[in-house]
Image (cartoon, rainbow, N blue to C red):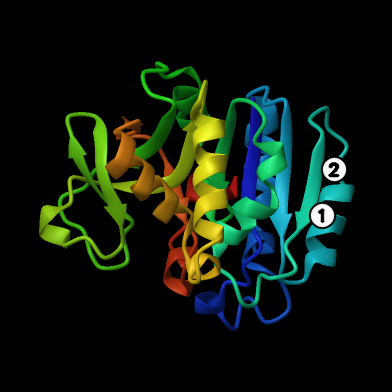
Amino acid sequence: MKTIILSAGRGSRLLPLTETRPKCLLPVGETTVLGRQLDTLEAAGVSEAVVVTGFMTALVEDEVARRSGPMPVTTMFNPFFQIADNLASCWMVRDHMDGDFLLINGDTLFEAALLEDVLNSPHELPVQVTIDRKSAYDSDDMKVQLDGSRLRAIGKSLPPERADAESIGMLRFTGEGPAIYRAKLEQMMRTQDGVSQWFLKAIDAIASTTGQVGTFSIEGRRWNEVDTVEDYEGIDGYFKT
């Protein structure tokens, strides 16, 4: 299965750590956030990875070029990264959505067992959002509302008290899923505010209009989002070994 990684952003909430490098290249143990992602994907037998770049793209391209493993890794530069959100990054790489694929945030660290669970999970619906649960949610969480395991809504603006879980930033598209998502990308990018939308806004729209978005819980597995300095300083020691 192919994997697309959204790594175009600078990570302004991580300043000054991202003054001279994008957040996907922040050190994690002996590698970087991106390096850790690619190593885990390669070990799981993922067929190919495509990294969408933006801020300081040359540094990311150099990181990819230094890899020598069996998994092919290519980059796609998003020249609009300074004025657009990550829906535009998905639109830039839509031609790679030509078969089953994973879509991963460039700031999500995940253990091998989590990835294996997602890859081997049942193909019940064509679009699947990976979720985790905790006792309480805040305004910064990518919150989800569920109907059983089916996604009803997703977004940071959902009321925390009405959230059933949170998205970890890893989605799987199978069967008709890639075509459904490409069509929604094309539709949304033709609107006036398309470039300012998050890629999960398209997932929310698909869920509300078709009901074809499922979820898969990875409760108990290790993962970290690296969105703020506090997040970075609190990375699970597992990822640093």
State the residue at coordinates (57%, 72%): 11
Question: What residue is disc 2 on?
Answer: 67
Which of 108 and 169 lies nearest the eye of the viewer?
169
Residue 70: quadrant of the picture: top right
Which of 107 and 236 lies nearest the eye of the viewer?
107
* Image location of residue 108, percent across then percent down: 51, 51
Q: Quadrant of the C terminus?
A: top right
Dot 1: element: helix
Q: How many numbered discs?
A: 2
> In the picture provided, is 110 more to the left or to the right than 77?
left
State the residue at coordinates (24%, 43%): 133
Q: Which mark is residue 94?
A: none
- Determine whether label 1 and label 2 are within 8 Å by CB: yes
Circle 2: residue type: Arg
State the residue at coordinates (42%, 17%): 123
Q: Is residue 12 above or below residue 208?
A: below
Categorize mark 1 by other alpha carbons within 10 Å: few (<14), some (14-19), many (20+): some
* Image location of residue 182, percent across then percent down: 57, 41
> In the picture provided, is 215 more to the left or to the right than 94?
left
Dot 2: element: loop
Question: What residue is disc 1 on?
Answer: 63
State the residue at coordinates (48%, 73%): 229
Categorize mark 2 by other alpha carbons within 10 Å: few (<14), some (14-19), many (20+): some
- Distance Cα–Cα, label 1 vs label 2: 7 Å
